[in-house]
Amino acid sequence: MRNWISNNMWVALSIGLASTVSGCASVPGPVGSVPAPTHSEQNYSIGGNDYTRPTLLRTLQPGDARIWSIAFSPDGSHFATGSESGTIRIWTCGSLTEADPQPIHALEGHTNRVFDLDFTPDGTRLVSSGRDSNVFVWDVETGEIVHAMPHAWEIRAAAISPDGTTLITGQLGGPNGKQAPTVFVWDLQTGRPLQTLTHLAPCSDISFSPDGVLFALGLIDGEASMIVDTQSRKDVMPLGYSGVWATAVLFDPTGQRLALSTVRSPLDTRTIGKIQFWDARSGDELDPIEPSSGAVGMDFTPDGKYLIASLPDDKKIVIWDIETHQEIAAFPSSPTTEVDISPDGRILAGCSPQDGSVQLWVFGDGQAPVVRAAKNAAWNPATDAPSSTPASGSVEEPNH
């Protein structure tokens, strides 16, 4: 979960400094059936893994004013988007080469924006976290809510343990501005609460290590971000210091590194953003990356060699080599606040609360489809250098 806004307001608005009190929604009944993925969908793959050559595949407009969250399923056959209205849409990656992709289902339950989406490791459940103070666990096949986990205030972050048994949720703060615990542990199988941690700072992001031994909390407003032992649920090591605001925290897929993106002030992300790294085994802090503005959405490529980050102030996405910190690609985007890369590393998805778009890129050296530019297209997507005004269009498979 990585949802922040810029233009001197993006961060403050996203973390809820301008929000009103949200109540807990009642749990609705079944919302229909989500078609099970077909064999072709389960094995669908386009693009390649040359991250120096990104190309915009297409831009989707799901229909809501703002799209706050996006996540791929573990097998890469589907992805989900969460909107301002609370609607969650599930899409098939196989439909991305169709002329007019449509979601296969819409899940209705939240009454306000959906800040975070997480599929369980087996792909059968989807966890959604909302501004309405609810966390819902959905059955992906039936579209029914399996568990509802009400909180006292809006939920900005959630993370599922690698074994799929435990859920950690992060609350933005206490009701009516009062100080209250913000980090909660749940049994994902039963939906029952297990423990409330002692942290009082608003929690902006959560990430489990690949082996599930540790989880990291991105905290703001008075507490340093923290690494926590999963079994004992005791703090292990602070990350940085308390004078910064975490926008994203993330273990790499190999478990060797931990990345933390921070800004100094919620009202100004420009020039003061930093991405810090730690050796996840020794705890040693490594050299940071200092992007041109605050990084908001972050994801590692599946091999752990590259870090992808969205810079919404600059309307671009940047990819760095983790070892050398060399920038290997930078390309224009909407003011993107969350990014997620498919499990095979071939498709990058980003969403924007500002214009309501979902943009999808593919990388070079693969069977990437050719996009026939729409009437308002300002660039040729068959090239390797898209302009700053990409447009959606129909698609066709290339001739070989």
Image (cartoon, rainbow, N blue to C red):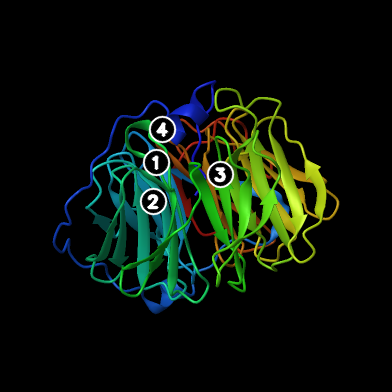
Task: Classify 10 Å Cα crowding around label 4: few (below 14), some (14-19), many (20 and above).
Answer: some
Distance, label 3 to label 2, CA atoms, is: 24 Å
Residue at image point 41% right, 33% down: 16
Look at label 4 and name its amino acid. Answer: Gly
Mark number displayed over residue 219: 3
Residue under the image location 58 percent in, 46 percent down:
248
Q: Which mark is residue 67?
A: 1
In the depicted structure, whether residue 222 falls above or below residue 53: above
Q: Nearer the viewer, mark 3 or mark 4?
A: 3
Cα–Cα span, label 3 and label 1: 23 Å
Q: Amino acid at mark 3?
A: Leu
Comes first in the chain, label 2 or label 4? 4
Q: Badges 1 and 2: C-beta atoms under 8 Å apart?
A: yes
Give the residue displayed 83% in from the left and 55% down from the top: 323
Residue with the mark numbered 2: 81
Q: CA distance from mark 1 to mark 2?
A: 7 Å
Q: Nearer the viewer, residue 35 or 270?
A: 270
Q: Residues within 10 Å of mark 1 (few under 14, many from 20)?
A: many
Q: Between marks 2 and 4, how big is the CA–CA gap?
A: 20 Å
Alpha carbon of mark 3 to alpha carbon of mark 4: how far? 14 Å
Mark nearer the viewer, 2 or 4: 4
266 vs 59, left or right, is right
The residue located at (51%, 49%) in the rendering is: 199
Query: Which of the two discs, 1 and 2, labels the residue nearer the N terminus?
Result: 1
SS for callout 1: strand
Q: Residues within 10 Å of mark 2 (few under 14, many from 20)?
A: many
- Mark with earlier residue (3, 2): 2
Q: Which residue is mark 4?
A: 16
Question: How far across and how far down the image is residue 355, in percent?
Answer: 42, 31
